[in-house]
Image (spheres, grey):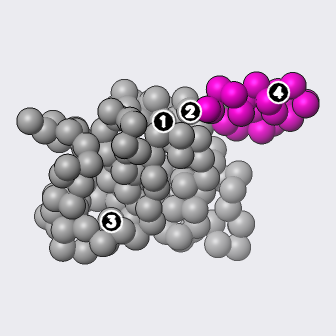
């Protein structure tokens, strides 16, 4: 489906849309391959491009930009924002569609803290518990935006199911 969309927009000259879809699919692949550096670079670019300078340095702005960055992931996932899970609300959750064998993804955002702390929160509040039955494996993605460096820091873990 994503390939068909890419071809359709390419044929009518929508090169920027085609490029954005390709970058989004690449970001998803980098996430599934647990490539922290490429994910961070992509988040830096999307956050800068998609956020207002007036609201750039807040978690909601970052979350909206990152959701946009994963636009093409909708081919394989239902994406939720602030999903009630475990003992709180996960900032973003990617639940694989029934026809997909991809891992679920739980994302926690931090601002001027640490990506490792985001992963610790996912574990402490047991966000993955509500995803059992939807996916065999679950990727935990911790994202921290560092205001001083204007960079995103990434931490990733894979929970492998039975």
Residue 152 in percent (x, y) is at 47, 49
User: What residue did someone put label 4 on?
Assistant: 10
Q: Residue 101, located in which quarter of the rendered image?
A: top left
What element does badge 1 sit on?
Answer: helix
User: What residue did someone put label 3 on?
Assistant: 90
Closer to the observer: label 4 or label 1? 4
In the image, is 80 to the left or to the right of 48?
left
What element does badge 4 sit on?
Answer: helix
Task: Please determine whether, in this image, residue 40 is positioned above or below residue 56.
Answer: above
Q: Are marks 4 and 2 in contact (CB under 8 Å)?
A: no
Q: Main secondary structure of the magenta part?
A: helix
Q: Which mark is residue 28?
A: 1
Residue 154 in percent (x, y) is at 37, 45
Q: Mark 4 or mark 2: which comes first in sequence?
A: 4
Magenta-colored span = 1-21
User: Label 4, label 1: how many angstroms apart (C-alpha)?
Assistant: 21 Å
| Residue drawn at point x = 25 percent, y = 68 percent | 85
| Residue drawn at point x = 82 percent, y = 27 percent | 10
Nearer to me, 80 or 133: 133
Nearer to me, 51 or 162: 162
Task: Please determine whether, in this image, residue 50 is positioned above or below residue 86.
Answer: above
Q: Are marks 2 and 1 in contact (CB under 8 Å)?
A: yes
In the image, is 70 to the left or to the right of 87?
right
Residue 124 in percent (x, y) is at 14, 64
What element does badge 2 sit on?
Answer: helix
Residue 9 is covered by the magenta coloring: yes
Q: Residue furthest toward the front?
A: 99
User: What residue did someone put label 2 on?
Assistant: 25
Q: Quadrant of the C terminus?
A: top left
Q: Mark 4 or mark 1: which comes first in sequence?
A: 4
Query: Badge 4: how crowded within 10 Å, few (<14), some, or many (20+)?
Result: some
């Amino acid at each position: 489906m994503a390939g068909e969309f890419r071809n359709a927009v390419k044929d009518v000259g929508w090169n920027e849309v085609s490029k954005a879809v390709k970058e989004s699919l690449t970001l998803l692949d980098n996430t599934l391959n647990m490539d922290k550096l490429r994910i961070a670079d992509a988040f830096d670019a999307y956050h800068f491009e998609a956020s207002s300078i007036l609201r750039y340095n807040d978690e909601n702005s970052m979350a909206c930009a990152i959701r946009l960055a994963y636009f093409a992931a909708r081919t394989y996932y239902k994406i939720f924002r602030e999903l009630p899970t475990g003992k709180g609300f996960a900032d973003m959750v990617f639940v694989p569609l029934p026809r997909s064998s991809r891992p679920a993804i739980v994302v926690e955002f931090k601002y001027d803290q640490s990506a490792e702390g985001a992963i610790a929160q996912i574990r402490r509040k047991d966000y993955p518990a509500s995803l059992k039955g939807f996916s065999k494996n679950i990727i935990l993605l911790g994202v921290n935006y560092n205001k001083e460096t204007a960079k995103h820091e990434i931490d990733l873990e894979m929970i492998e199911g039975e």
